[in-house]
Image (spheres, grey):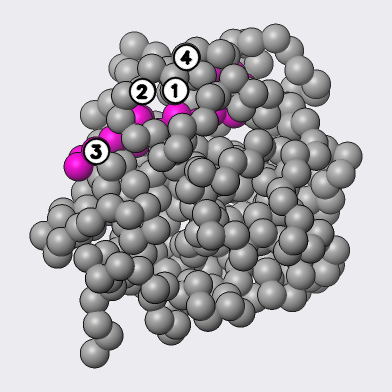
Amino acid sequence: MTKSNRPQRLHLYLNHHIDSRRWDRVVPRDDDIVIATPYKCGTTWTQGIVSSLVLGRCAVSASPWADFRPVGDSVVERIEKQKHRRFLKTHLPLDGIPFHEQIRYIVVSRDPRDVFMSLWNHYSSYTDAGYAELEGRSEHIGDPFPRCPEDVREFWKMWISRGWFEWETEGYPFWSNLGHVQSWWNFRHLSNILFVHYNHLKQDVIRQIRRIAAYLEIAVDDAQVNEIVNATTLDSMRKLAKENEDSKQPPTFSGGADSFYYKGTNNRWQGVLTKQDLQLYDEAAERVLTTECRRWLEKGILEDSSRGVATEQPCPAVPAMFACPSQS
């Protein structure tokens, strides 16, 4: 792909979790926002930030996962009924989603090894009810979602070396992680795609909130930014999720919100993955990622300094009313 090409929808993503056909029924609006991540990259954190900017309050439930297969077409109906500025979530690569020039896309990324450790906690916490939900709410599509292995390294080997879809070579039994990011990275030059890195959210969340606000053309003052910071901490998001849990329904994850909102820390893969395991990662990165995209995932550094993605780079040029605070 070259920079002159417009993103094209090339694949149908259809398995136990995702159904890319849902997007065919979503009528785009000029001010729509789409938060795109593979998984376990700070999706919910970014949703909380965006909802606070748009609605003035943290309301993650207002950000539907449009391509989540088990909930059926009701999610599309809920999206269409929303009256406020919509912010939607997708776990689809750019080659599986309709691309609209008027929509603002926020792509959230994280070091793949940190993604894996968070995904391990997520996958290993599925309850029987969680597995049943994935198979029972709509028509059966493809192979069932396999149970999580008991050995973390067994999961690593299949996740980093095997794809669920025939055009992918990693991400099993979910969908590609590396390939997902690369698909968006190929079009990072487009003005309606903003890359956000999980590490940057952890290192300087105030700066990232201001970046996102500027990109969405939403004016915020210091007091509002501080409110968003407090509303979107891990503890605050966990508390909000627990308040919204349906006690009448069996939990999808063992431990409920306490499990879903786990530690949020990096580098837990050190001491877990061996030298041989990391060699598999190097091989996957060589297959799937460009050098620049890998550098972004691991270091949070973007070659094009004019986009202002890396923390050591200046904020992007924006109107004064949205400007980032000076760096002293």
Asked if residue 246 lies left or right of residue 126, the reply is left
Q: Earlier in the sequence, mark 3 or mark 2?
A: 3
Q: Are marks 3 and 2 in contact (CB under 8 Å)?
A: no
Q: Position of residue 92 (x, y in %)?
A: 64, 40
| Place of residue 215 in the rendered image (x, y in percent of width and height, measured from the top left) | 39, 58
Q: Amino acid at mark 1?
A: Ile
Rendered location of residue 149, percent (x, y): 70, 40
Distance of label 4 from label 3 (alpha carbons)? 20 Å
Dot 4 amino acid type: Glu
Give the quadrant of residue 24: top right
Label 4 sits on residue: 77
Please tell me whether residue 198 is drawn above or below residue 133 in the rendered image. below
Q: Secondary structure at mark 2?
A: loop
Q: CA distance from mark 2 to mark 1?
A: 6 Å
The count of marks equals: 4
User: Mark 3 sits on what residue?
Assistant: 55
- Image height check: is 260 above or below 320? above
Q: Which residue is mark 2?
A: 82
**The disc labelled 2 sits on which kind of residue?**
Gln
